[in-house]
């Protein structure tokens, strides 16, 4: 059997659909479907869906369940562009990011470079570049 992740659904507050449309559009994802209080966005065969049906309980990314969604980029510069995008919108970068994480990449010729932040629904996001330090 061969499988892959096809899609992931996040329950959100409906008024936050625009946040996800704008963020993932900035990151190069295309809109697959959008209606009132719901949006599906895709990249490379995978999709994420944000459904405006949250029950009001706060997401706890340190509790049981999913911790974060990681979106890979092709350069360190893309991580920095994302950090600027966030700053322009007063979205706080978390955990002293952007930063290189040598604890995640032991090869000194490579890097794990990330920025982390949370959405208005407290969904934790990571935009990350892994590869050559020169890229």
Image: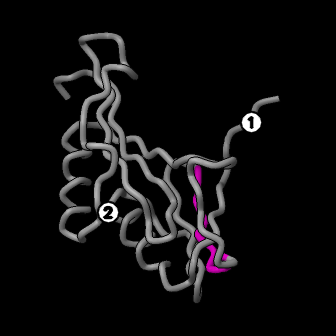
Question: Residue 31 versus residue 96: which sits nearer the camera?
Answer: 96
Q: Quadrant of the N terminus?
A: top right
**Does residue 62 belong to the magenta stretch?**
no
Residue annotated with mark 1: 3
Q: Position of residue 32 (x, y in %)?
A: 55, 69
What residue is drawn where x is 52% and y is 48%?
Answer: 68
SS state under label 2: helix
Which corner quadrant of the image does residue 115 belong to?
top left
Q: Is residue 100 left or right of residue 62?
A: left
Per the rendering, the mark at residue 26 is 2
SS state under label 1: loop
Question: Residue 21 versus residue 95: which sits nearer the camera?
Answer: 95
Prevalent SS, magenta region: strand
Image position of 55 with respect to 97: above or below: below
Image position of 37 with respect to 48: above or below: below
Q: Residue furthest right?
A: 1
Q: Position of residue 84 (x, y in %)?
A: 18, 57
Q: Position of residue 106 (x, y in %)?
A: 35, 12
Q: Residue furthest bottom?
A: 36
Badge 2: residue crowd in 10 Å (few <14, some 14–19, many ≥20): few
Q: Earlier in the sequence, mark 2 or mark 1?
A: 1
Q: Is residue 75 left or right of residue 11?
A: left
Q: Is residue 88 left or right of residue 9?
A: left
Q: Quadrant of the C terminus?
A: top left
What residue is drawn where x is 23% and y is 53%?
Answer: 83
Which corner quadrant of the image does residue 102 belong to?
top left
Q: Which of the colour schemes (rainbow, by chain, secondary structure, one colour) is used?
A: one colour
Region in magenta = 46-54
What residue is drawn where x is 50% and y is 64%?
Answer: 122
Per the rendering, the mark at residue 91 is none
Badge 1: residue crowd in 10 Å (few <14, some 14–19, many ≥20): few
Which corner quadrant of the image does residue 99 belong to?
top left
């Amino acid at each position: 059997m061969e499988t892959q992740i096809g899609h992931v659904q996040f329950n959100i507050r409906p008024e936050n659909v625009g946040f996800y449309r704008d963020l993932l559009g900035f990151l190069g994802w295309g809109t697959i479907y959008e209606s009132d209080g719901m949006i599906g966005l895709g990249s490379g065969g995978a999709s994420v869906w944000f459904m405006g049906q949250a029950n009001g309980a706060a997401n706890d990314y340190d509790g049981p369940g999913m911790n974060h969604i990681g979106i890979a980029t092709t350069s360190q510069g893309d991580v920095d562009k994302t950090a600027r995008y966030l700053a322009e919108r007063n979205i706080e970068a978390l955990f002293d990011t952007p930063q290189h994480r040598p604890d995640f990449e032991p090869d000194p010729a490579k890097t794990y470079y990330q920025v982390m932040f949370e959405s208005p629904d407290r969904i934790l996001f990571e935009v990350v570049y892994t590869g050559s330090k020169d890229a």
